Amino acid sequence: MYLIFYFFSFLTILFTFLTIIQSNLMYSLFYFSMSVLTTSFIFFLLGNYFIGSLQIIIYSGAILVLFIFVIMLLNYDVVKNGIHNMKFNYLYLSFLISLFFCVLYKIFFILKIKYIVHITDTLHILGINLFKPYLFIIELISILLLSIVLIVFLITKNKK
Amino acid sequence: MTSINYNFINIIFCFFKTLFIVFIIVFCGAMLSFIERRVLALFQNRYGPNRVGWFGLLQIVADMIKMLFKEDWVPSFSKSFLFILAPIISFISLLLVMSIIPFTDQKFIINLNIGVLFFLIMSALSVYSILFAGWSSNNKYALLGSIRAIAQTLSYEVFLGLSLMGVVAQSHSFNLFDIVYSQKKIWNIFPQFFGFITFFIAGLALCHRHPFDQPESEQELADGYHIEYSGMKFGMFFIGQYISMIVIASMITVLFLGGWYGPYLPKFLWFFFKTFILILFFILLRASLPRPRYDQILYFGWIICLPITLLNLIFTAFLILLY
């Protein structure tokens, strides 16, 4: 049981790493879908079947296929050059990294219950848990996501 | 000692039962190609395959021999790993759904609590086979076919799940056994009629049957995403399509037509009859409907079917809250 858990955790980390270092966009997305799949295997292993299956249906099934679909339709070289010529704005980057460390700090040092998967069985309990003890983390993560969306918007705007 | 022995016998029994059911399903999938050719021919006022065996029954054996001994060619310009992986996903993903389907209340492989979700997982993963096949073949017809297939599957997958939610709300469970038990008095096709219609359409689109066979339309795309495949790899795509047809038909039987319930006859026969009639209906649709244009299919999915499923779900939830 522990062996399988560590095996899938290793696979998840490996595939996520490969997603980042891969220069070919298609392969990068394939690795990302693999990492999503292995994450859902961990959910299944921990006994939370509902979230595990939702993870596959929504992320691996719909959203990633949509990404790959868009990249198939795009002019491939433009995308490739756009990523390699991207200039990092260090202000945004430091903001994002500090937000990320805020989340980590909250999880490791302030929260008493660290295992979200052991409490949740149904969607009802999950919703209550997300909006009571984990509210601050959810807010931080949503701000993180919003800033990522803004940065993507800026990058695509600068290209033209 | 005895408990270990008992466990061992139990495991062996389960293994052979599963193997037997898988064999039956694959065999039925192969035989369906013969049945479809014969029925289509009868609709078009000819006789169909009639050279090999009794009434042409051995046509499938001849086809199989041809496919097995053909040269299994992996094109040098393709991405070979994904190229080989694609037919395997196509064959396996919907075959796995057969494991959760209750044939009767005694005959089943596994009783999963997330039955409906498992079906949705596998239908979501089956998209990857088309994607890999179309992209790794490095061929413009294959790419066009797979782009069409993905756009179609993505837009139909949305209300494939939504149309089932009415049934799930009525039986308060994702478990397929609970769903069948909840239909003891009345089959779900009557209270969930719009759910049935939309699930039927989405199921047709999921297994790329006529009139939703955009990805492999022979006249424009020369076979679509599996154009570069030959031999047994093509055979896996081919049989995979018939297996997905059986899976969709038996899912409709379980979810909307009351599973094994029916008077007089044994339970297994009722399940078999319902599934077989649905498959015949699939073939009849292929014989009678023309193929609509690509944008018309997407328009139909998003503008007509999605609102119908949403309204159906809201209405069902309203009625459940009321009573």
Image (tube, rainbow, N blue to C red):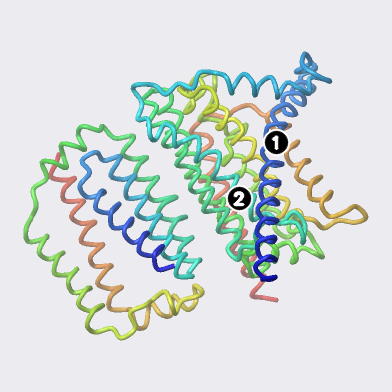
Q: Are marks 2 and 1 in contact (CB under 8 Å)?
A: no
Tell me the amino acid under the disc marked 2. Answer: Val
Classify mark 2: residues with Cα within 10 Å, few (<14), some (14-19) or many (20+): many
Residue at 83% over, 20% down: B54
Mark with earlier residue (2, 1): 1
- Determine which quarter of the picture holds residue B161: bottom right
Of A6 and A156, the residue lying toward us:
A6
Q: Position of residue A101 (x, y in %)?
A: 17, 71
**Mark 1: secondary structure:** helix
Q: Residue furthest left?
A: A90
Q: Is residue B16 left or right of residue A27?
A: right
In the displayed structure, would residue B46 be above or below residue B164? above
> Which residue is disc 1 drawn over?
B27
State which chain disc 2 sits on.
B
The quadrant in which the N terminus of chain B is found is bottom right
Q: Residue furthest top?
A: B51
Tell me the amino acid under the disc marked 1. Answer: Phe
Residue at 26% over, 40% down: A25
Of B270 and A78, the residue lying toward us:
B270
**Mark 2: secondary structure:** helix
> Which residue is disc 2 drawn over?
B97
- Determine which quarter of the picture holds residue B162: bottom right
Residue at 76% over, 20% down: B41
| Circle on res. B299 | none
Q: How many marks?
A: 2
State which chain disc 1 sits on.
B
Q: Is residue A124 left or right of residue B61?
A: left
The quadrant in which the C terminus of chain B is found is bottom right
